[in-house]
Amino acid sequence: MRLVLYSGGVDSTTALLWSLQTQETHALLFVYPSRHNAQELAHARAICEAHRIVYHTIDASALFAGFASDLLTPNAQSSTIPHGQYDANALSHLVVPFRNGIFLSIASGFAQSLGASKVVLANHAGDHPIYPDCSRAFIDSMGAAIVSGTGGAVQLVSPFCELDKAAIVRLGITLNIDYAQTYSCYEGGAKHCNQCPTCLESLEAFRQNGLVIER
Amino acid sequence: MRLVLYSGGVDSTTALLWSLQTQETHALLFVYPSRHNAQELAHARAICEAHRIVYHTIDASALFAGFASDLLTPNAQSSTIPHGQYDANALSHLVVPFRNGIFLSIASGFAQSLGASKVVLANHAGDHPIYPDCSRAFIDSMGAAIVSGTGGAVQLVSPFCELDKAAIVRLGITLNIDYAQTYSCYEGGAKHCNQCPTCLESLEAFRQNGLVIER
């Protein structure tokens, strides 16, 4: 069985529905105090329910109390999200240190308890260098740590590590994914802002595939 | 600055006081629902306060709700702790899957926020093979994941990875550590049971160093 770390966004929705084609797959959702978490989770749950996918939710909200990131509350209330394309200087204050390491570790322990032999992370080649915990080097060493630290019970799968977002959407089209149901926006509002780096990146990937998506 | 993962037991107390000899060092305590956590934390806090060591506490109690381990509540209430030396068959139900991976990942993100460049784990060569997340293979790959996933900001230090518990106590004696103040017992009672594998292992390490410790 595979366990997909699932945020309800373009990348992890594609990973989830890709995985379901070939193996029993559950989704794992994290509650944590980012400004967009409530919207993410609402969309993630709705997509799981529409596809009858079993999902689990882990409450990580208390973990990040001492973390320095303007993506997290309470800082999130007073900080502003830069608009426009990814810019390392403008965005570095939004990085949550080692977030993928933390979520993957918890997912791996939970997977072992659940009897799932694979955890799936939908990081991709287009993830900006300000996120070092999306890099190939991180994935390879974290994957080795998960194998050795679970006594071989769990492996990390990163199916999109060499793909960019346009290629992920191309795969998703073959899986009949309705990307209008997904959510990924730094602002965390009920509607996508269509101005933050995450929105612009998704719009560009849709455009490259000839899709017009209303989110 | 170093950040030591600290449980108040023999190994991590030695690591904490060893680290303090050469560098500014803070302790990191985790609240989580193991049967011995309350006693561990009380002793860890008391030792930090006695040595004027700054400590941080992260609440990881919600994370483990779906984990299968008889060390964790609610199972902990009804399960029994085997007495006698380590026995893989008797103890495997007490393993918390990937616990060191989870705690190290959280510690690494927190360290980056705090400006600490090292996280210190007091795993050692005598840790029983039922704990794969104490092995050299795990430490090496997890260390590489932490470096790459924090963009080089944080490194993992495992000072006792090649030492057994008797050698750790030998080091501690040179640091004038009072091991009577430490706590590490699977039972989690106010007094050490002196019958569980952890108690027996500590007693043997004290004996090999000619120490008689009342805990």
Image: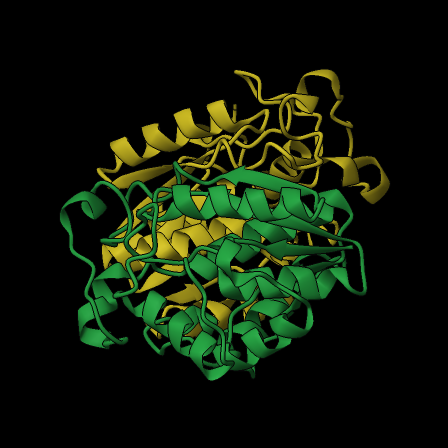
Chain colours: A yellow, B green
- Give how far across and how far down residue A49 sits, in percent: 26, 31
The part of the image, by quadrant, that contains residue A184 is top right
Placement of the N terminus of chain A among the 4 image quadrants: bottom left
- Give how far across and how far down residue B106 sits, in percent: 56, 49
Identify which residue is drawn at 41% across, 70% down. Answer: B202
* Residue A97 against residue A52 in the figure, above or below: below
Identify which residue is drawn at 26% across, 37% down. Answer: A51
Is B149 displayed left or right of A146 in the figure? right
**Closest to the observer, A102 or A200:** A102
- Give how far across and how far down residue B61 sits, in percent: 40, 38
**Closest to the observer, B83 or B154:** B83
* Residue B101 against residue A93 in the figure, above or below: below
Identify which residue is drawn at 69% across, 66% down. Answer: B18
Counting labels gives 0
Whether residue A164 is visible to the viewer of this picture, yes or no, is no
The part of the image, by quadrant, that contains residue A46 is top left
Is B24 displayed left or right of B149 in the figure? right
**Closest to the observer, B123 or B190:** B190
The part of the image, by quadrant, that contains residue B73 is top left
* Residue A132 against residue A209 in the figure, above or below: below
Whether residue B36 is visible to the viewer of this picture, yes or no, is yes
| Residue furthest out toward the right | A89
* Residue A101 against residue A189 in the figure, above or below: below
Is A181 displayed left or right of A110 in the figure? right
**Closest to the observer, A208 or B201:** B201
- Give how far across and how far down residue B133 sits, in percent: 44, 69
Identify which residue is drawn at 40% across, 41% down. Answer: B38
